[in-house]
Amino acid sequence: MTEVRAYEPADIPAMVEIWNEVVEDGIAFPHEDALDLQSGTAFFAEQTHCGVAVADGEVIGLYILHPNNIGRCGHIANASYAVGSAARGKGAGRLLVEDSLAQGRAHGFRVMQFNAVVASNAGARHLYEKLGFVQLGTIPGGFRMPDGSYADICPYYHEL
């Protein structure tokens, strides 16, 4: 059984490993630089909230939640999700997204906005739409793929 809870310092090595796996794949996150234990500790600490998916005592996924913007747009949240490759397709992503929506509300956000969902990330897009996210349009060539080609991105939002 998989559960989602707030991260703890002991989770950081597994979180860094999972995060880096997605970064190194280069097909979903805009980040290009891997985290190490020190930078990962700082990165996760600066988020509004981080949740981890845990199965059989192992961290198998995570999300980060933070404001999408500042000031007059500070009520809009943004989140990123990462599930380790061995655990994908088993429902952890859905649990992470659902928890991030609940945590977004709990932290006073009014909207969740995703700025750069890669159009080819069909699994994520299907999940977001199933959970009530609305696609705002398409930005042609908004994401640089590892091979140097450009893929479209699809912004999404969900009222909280």
Image: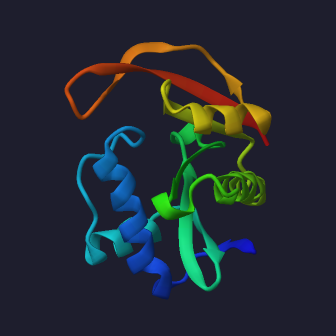
Query: Does residue 84 appear in the picture of this structure?
Result: no
Placement of the N terminus among the 4 image quadrants: bottom right
In the image, residue 76 sits, relative to residue 9, either above or below, namely above
- Residue occupying image coordinates x 56% and y 81%: 58
Query: Does residue 116 appear in the picture of this structure?
Result: yes
| Total count of labels | 0
- Residue at the extreme left of the image, as rendered: 148
Q: Where is residue 137 in the image (x, y as percent from the top left)?
A: 59, 14
Is 56 positioned to the left or the right of 8 in the image?
right
Q: How is the image coloured?
A: rainbow
- Residue occupying image coordinates x 24% and y 35%: 146
Placement of the C terminus among the 4 image quadrants: top right
In the image, residue 10 sits, relative to residue 34, either above or below, namely below
**103 or 152, nearer to the observer:** 152
Is 151 positioned to the left or the right of 160 in the image?
left
Q: Where is residue 56 in the image (x, y as percent from the top left)?
A: 65, 83
Is 138 positioned to the left or the right of 37 in the image?
right
In the image, residue 48 sits, relative to residue 110, either above or below, namely below
Q: Could you say which quadrant of the image residue 111 lies in?
A: top right
In the image, residue 17 sits, relative to residue 122, either above or below, namely below
- Residue occupying image coordinates x 37% and y 20%: 151
Q: Position of residue 94 (x, y in %)?
A: 71, 52
Q: Where is residue 36 in the image (x, y as percent from the top left)?
A: 26, 71
